[in-house]
Amino acid sequence: MSDPIQRDGLRHKFWEKVPLKDMSSKEWEALCDGCGRCCLNKLEDEDTFEIAFTRVACRLLDGDTCRCAQYDIRKQFVPDCVQLTPKNIDDIGYWMPPTCAYRLLNEGKPLEDWHPLISGTAQTVHDAGISVQGWTVPEFEVSEDEWENYIIED
């Protein structure tokens, strides 16, 4: 599977040296590991603010490639799609998956060995079993009232 994210021409190990707020837009985009977990619908407990990930995926997620089918114009189709930025990661990064590079770096943790920036290939996120490849359910097939039946148990 080819990697749609441009990872060439980046500063050497920029993620280890450059604060998130100082990364170029190309470096910021290259942090995405392509797992697709951020595109899963989530349920948040109103009392504890705990996030529960479901197998119910955004209507734009391609369950085979784990990529947004309309990434550049996604807000036209999904107006409430959140765009993670260096400015909002402190406020909304908590609902990103615990393996997410943006969240890890924001929390002062290193990238995982399977991350494409470390491994050199986008396939490692799938090989490591981190991605949602092959096990999501499109949101148009499940009513929102039933999402709790699709919560992912760790």
Image (cartoon, grey):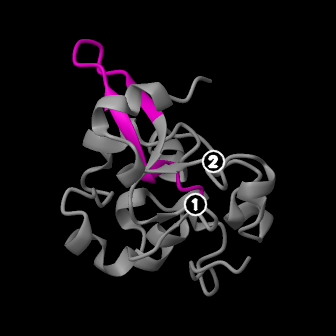
x 27%, y 56%: residue? 82
x 62%, y 68%: residue? 65
For label 1, the residue is: 63
Left or right of residue 34: residue 134: right
Find numbered disc 2 in the image and state the secondary structure of the residue it sits on.
loop
Residue 64 is covered by the magenta coloring: no
For label 2, the residue is: 135
Q: Are marks 2 and 1 in contact (CB under 8 Å)?
A: yes
Find numbered disc 1 in the image and state the secondary structure of the residue it sits on.
loop
What segment is highlighted magenta in the picture? Answer: 33-53
Looking at the image, is 135 positioned above or below residue 32?
above
The number of numbered discs placed on residues in the rendered structure image is: 2
Q: Quadrant of the N terminus?
A: bottom right
Looking at the image, is 120 positioned above or below residue 88?
below
Q: Position of residue 55 (x, y in %)?
A: 51, 40
Q: Position of residue 9 (x, y in %)?
A: 61, 87
